[in-house]
Amino acid sequence: MNIVLLEPFYTGSHASWAEGLAAHSRHRVEILELSGSHWKWRMHGGAVTLAERFLAGGYRPDFLLATDMLDMGAFLALTRKVTAGIPTAIYFHENQLTYPWSPKDRDKRRAWDRHYSFINFVSALACDRVFFNSRYHMNSFLEALPVFLRQFPDHQELGQVAVIRRKCEVLPLGFDLHSLDAAGDRPATEGVKSPRPLVLWNHRWEYDKNPEDFFAALQLVAGRGRAFDVALVGEVFDVVPAPFLAGASALGERIIHSGYVASRREYAGWLWRSHILPVTSNQDFFGGSVLEAMYCGCFPILPRRLAYPELIPEERYSACFYEEFDELVEKLDEAVCNFTSLETHDLREAARRYDWRDTAPLYDERFEAVRRGE
């Protein structure tokens, strides 16, 4: 089967997912992409540019797969002479109905953010199948849709929520986890771990990951006289958020690394060296960075409210979860004090099932079912 994957925001986790799928699927997957910048303009205009390139390239795929940053309704309208009758699906990495917008964003203050949510709504309606990376993500989107539609003056089309619901299913993210098995030129074994407690941040450096609580918890534990170091890795954009500057200054020499690690080997090295991953995110529809750290034997401390319980055998690892900030601090303090005895074997096994070698066949099966009209 020939698949065209439409990705208007080709960077970071979106690009890694697309490349992983193309490399591991038994089908031929061709990626048609735009660079990962100006995300609002990508949602507005990306469909026009990708439709033009699609038509100019003479594509005749058996299956069309888009991601949530594409206005799929516009794309299909512009390419209808070619794409009419081709099975379609959209994959939601995130969605604009429940993604927490920055309070500084002018569009949010003016209620212009609704337009991006509406693009997600229409794209879901336009496709034959709607995939989500987690059950938490799917349920939160479906629960938010009626609330969103009731904002409009008439013809709210609440009945379309049921139409979308019947097309939805969970298709978890795939990862190239085996690429993490080598840290530099050394095998990734327990011997790689740092001799001193090492706390890790391996997410994007952005407001929705809630760095304020991360650094506040670390400072409280440091105030108890605990010895630990901190490695800040993850993608950094044009402006470093103020909490990172203030937090790094407050922790001083405990920060042994601060900045994006572009090399996969170097990134893997930090994951294998680290012991503890305290997560304070306000938003995470799956938790890819958490999964990678788990695979490398890092013990996560996670808010129970997001998608993370789907990743971890909670019946054994209830110690990984917290409800409130004070509980996070206590669990972080306990982990720092007992870092050499943290149990991570089952966590690594739980993460392993998301490797592309296991998930790609699932993707292939689901895409074939859509093509058959099932």
Image (cartoon, rainbow, N blue to C red):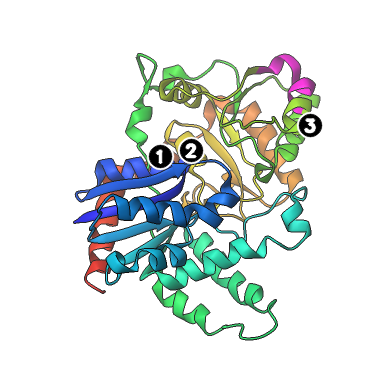
Q: Position of residue 15 (x, y in %)?
A: 42, 41
Badge 1, how many Cα within 10 Å: few under 14, some, many 20+? some
Q: Which residue is mark 3?
A: 220
Q: Amino acid at mark 2?
A: Gly
Q: Amino acid at mark 1?
A: Ser
Residue 249 magenta: yes
Q: Is residue 133 visible?
A: no
Question: Helix, strand or loop at disc 1?
Answer: helix
For marks 2 and 3, give the CA distance: 32 Å
Q: Position of residue 312 (x, y in %)?
A: 47, 49
Q: Earlier in the sequence, mark 1 or mark 3?
A: 1
Report the quarter where the C terminus lies.
bottom left
Residue 158 magenta: no
Disc count in the image? Answer: 3
Q: Amino acid at mark 3?
A: Leu
* The residue stretch that appears in magenta: 247-255
The residue under the point 41% across, 61% down is 90
Q: Position of residue 334 (x, y in %)?
A: 66, 34
Q: Which residue is mark 2?
A: 12
The residue under the point 28% across, 49% down is 57
Taking depth in this image into account, of 132 and 226 the one nearest to the observer is 132
Left or right: 334, with 293 as reference point = right
The residue under the point 44% across, 22% down is 263
Q: Position of residue 190 (x, y in %)?
A: 42, 22
Q: Earlier in the sequence, mark 2 or mark 3?
A: 2
Q: Which residue is mark 1?
A: 16
Left or right: 321, with 132 as reference point = right
Mark 2 touching mark 3, by CB under 8 A?
no
Report the quarter where the N terminus lies.
bottom left
Question: Helix, strand or loop at disc 3?
Answer: helix
